[in-house]
Amino acid sequence: MRFIEEVVVEEFLPTFRSLLAEALRERDLTQSEVAELLGISQSAVSKYVHGNVDRNEALLDHRGLAELVERLADGLAAGETTSVQALVETEVFIRELERGGLLAQLHEQRVPELAEYEGEFAVHDPDSTLRAAEQALSSVRRGLQVLENTSGFATLIPAVGSNLVEALPDGDSIEDVAAVPGRILDVKGRATIPADPEFGVSEHVASVLLAARAAGSDARAALNVRYDESIVTALSEAGYTTAEFDAEASVETGVAEALAETPDADVLYQTGGMGVEPVVYVLGPDAGTVAERTRELL
């Protein structure tokens, strides 16, 4: 009886650590610095860097793993990613590979009977809600990293705060939307993210996204920024389709009417009303894309 966790320990970890150790050394970090970042000994770093470890060929050829290693190496080397953040992102990636991904395939190779399992419960469950939730949370984290590393983003945060949200593929309620608890705030000119993203913690931005989806938009993510005519113009000139909605109507009605007139809109905005701050909502297929679109404003 072999568990998938054994595949992680015996196949994934040596391959991942050796790739990341190599990438960090290529960025001129010392063996000691690499050891501290990875939480391993210097002798282990030496072993990884000099190829004295068995690596899984299938994992070496996995594009997603290569992209993860490069992203983490860049962030760790520049001091923009902490070891804890790197650990969390890697854990999410491992869970994805365990549920219908390469680790699930490697597990089935070791235990062929799993591939033939015909019970009601799919062991690796590639379409599980849990997997989709982890992917959404990971996507929001990546988008938040983009915003944190975008100089001047704080100037785009409205008085009510910003939030970066992403819905599950079939999400239709606030509980199906991942977001930042308490919103992103401008604290002394710096965008401050109070906590890791969770589901069900955004009411306003999530409501706008859900209303857009209910009205036919295929957007999965959204970010709100302060309204200014120049911001709307800049987004329009960048090739995005903008649509204004009525701030004094209900969110569902206002957004539905706007999208009825401009169904391909990927930017929604309202210019304010009685007690309502004017705001721009940037929509997109995922949180990372929305963050990158917003970065173009600066």
Image: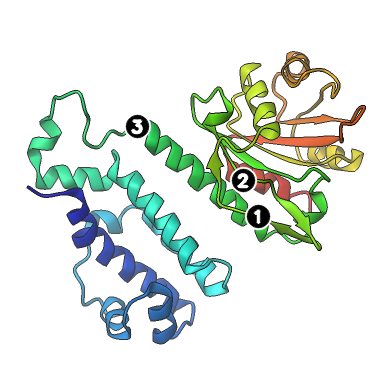
Front residue of this view, candidates 150 and 28: 150
Query: Which residue is drawn at the image coordinates 70% and 27% (left, top)?
Result: 208
> Looking at the rendering, which quadrant does residue 205 occupy?
top right
Q: Is residue 149 left or right of residue 94?
A: right
Q: Is residue 11 left or right of residue 297?
A: left
Contact between marks 3 and 1 (CB within 8 A): the answer is no
Q: Is residue 270 left or right of residue 286?
A: right
Amino acid carrying label 1: it is Ile
Front residue of this view, candidates 118 and 65: 118
Amino acid carrying label 3: it is Ser
Q: What is the CA distance from the residue labelled 3 to the residue labelled 1? A: 29 Å
Query: Which residue is drawn at the image coordinates 28% and 76% (left, top)?
Result: 48
Secondary element at image label 2: loop
Contact between marks 1 and 2 (CB within 8 A): the answer is yes
The disc label shown at residue 264, or none: none
Residue 84's place in the image compared with 295, above or below, is below
Q: Which residue is mark 2?
A: 180
Q: What is the CA distance from the residue labelled 1 to the residue labelled 2? A: 7 Å
Q: Which residue is mark 3?
A: 128
Q: Which residue is mark 1?
A: 193
Q: Position of residue 175 (x, y in %)?
A: 54, 30
Q: What is the CA distance from the residue labelled 3 to the residue labelled 2? A: 23 Å
Judged by depth in the image, the label closer to the viewer, 3 or 2, is 2
Secondary element at image label 3: loop
- Name which of mark 3 and mark 1 comes first in the sequence: 3
Q: How is the image coloured?
A: rainbow
Q: Position of residue 62 (x, y in %)?
A: 33, 52
Q: Alpha-carbon neighbours of circle 1 within 10 Å: few (<14), some, or many (≥20)?
A: many
